[in-house]
């Protein structure tokens, strides 16, 4: 584990986003920014360690592949956590109010050094006409988006928890993709 310099978490709450600012961050975020504080990598090829259960595997891999195949970010898989940039986990953490949680380790200037993207398998509900795996893919996609520096947003994509809860989208929106490509 890379020592946490600043360890900050951004949670996807179970019941939509509402008006709550769910960023548990030390400083107020930039108003209207699509970015989570100023967290960013200084590279675009990231090593990802996948540690997923049998039920979490397919949605987690689909989410990771979307980001890697459709943006200027490239994920390269590793089984060695000590060299991983991002770790993708799932587990049953119980009824703790978060479906997904992203935790970044970052320097004082916001350069991300490590990130965990986690899905809480306790929550299995899906919007009408969608499967649990569909919903989980969206959660993994959102947490990975946070790991790339994106905040929650109002686009019809996976950075918007309401879009997922209503069954509209479980993948990054075109504006999510554009934002990533403008940065990396
Ligand atoms: Zn880790």
Image: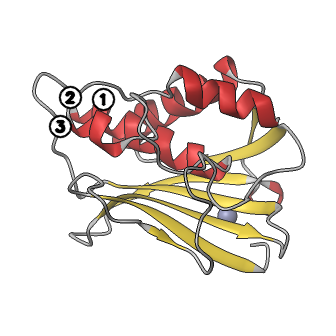
Does the closest atom of ligand 1 sit within 8 Å of the Cβ of label 2?
no
Q: Residue furthest front?
A: 31
How crowded pointer 2 is (Cα within 10 Å; few <14, some 14-19, many 20+) is rated as some
3 and 2 marks in contact (CB < 8 Å): yes
Q: Residue, x 30% and y 34% (percent of image)?
A: 163
**Residue topped by disc 3:** 126
Q: CA distance from mark 2 to mark 1?
A: 5 Å
Closest to the observer, 164 or 120 = 164
**Residue topped by disc 1:** 134
What label does residue 131 carry, if any? 2
Q: Secondary structure at mark 3?
A: loop
Q: Residue, x 20% and y 69% (percent of image)?
A: 95
**In the drawing, does residue 61 fall left or right of residue 104?**
left
Q: Secondary structure at mark 2?
A: loop
Q: Residue furthest right?
A: 42
2 and 1 marks in contact (CB < 8 Å): yes
1 and 3 marks in contact (CB < 8 Å): yes
Q: Secondary structure at mark 1?
A: helix
């Amino acid at each position: 584990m890379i020592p946490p310099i600043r360890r900050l978490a951004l949670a996807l709450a179970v019941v939509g986003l509402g008006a709550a600012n769910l960023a548990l961050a030390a400083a107020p975020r930039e108003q209207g920014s699509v970015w989570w504080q100023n967290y960013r990598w200084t590279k675009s090829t990231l090593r990802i360690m996948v540690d997923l259960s049998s039920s979490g595997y397919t949605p987690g891999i689909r989410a990771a592949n979307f980001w890697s195949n459709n943006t200027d970010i490239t994920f390269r898989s590793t089984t060695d956590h000590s060299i991983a940039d991002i770790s993708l986990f799932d587990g049953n953490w119980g009824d703790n109010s978060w479906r997904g949680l992203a935790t970044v380790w970052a320097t004082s200037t916001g350069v991300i050094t490590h990130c965990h993207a986690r899905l809480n398998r306790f929550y299995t509900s899906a919007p009408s006409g969608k499967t649990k795996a569909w919903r989980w893919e969206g959660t993994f996609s959102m947490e990975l988006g946070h790991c790339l520096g994106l905040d929650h947003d109002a686009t019809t994509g996976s950075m918007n928890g309401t879009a997922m809860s209503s069954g509209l989208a479980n993948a990054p929106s075109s504006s999510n993709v554009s934002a990533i490509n403008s940065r990396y």
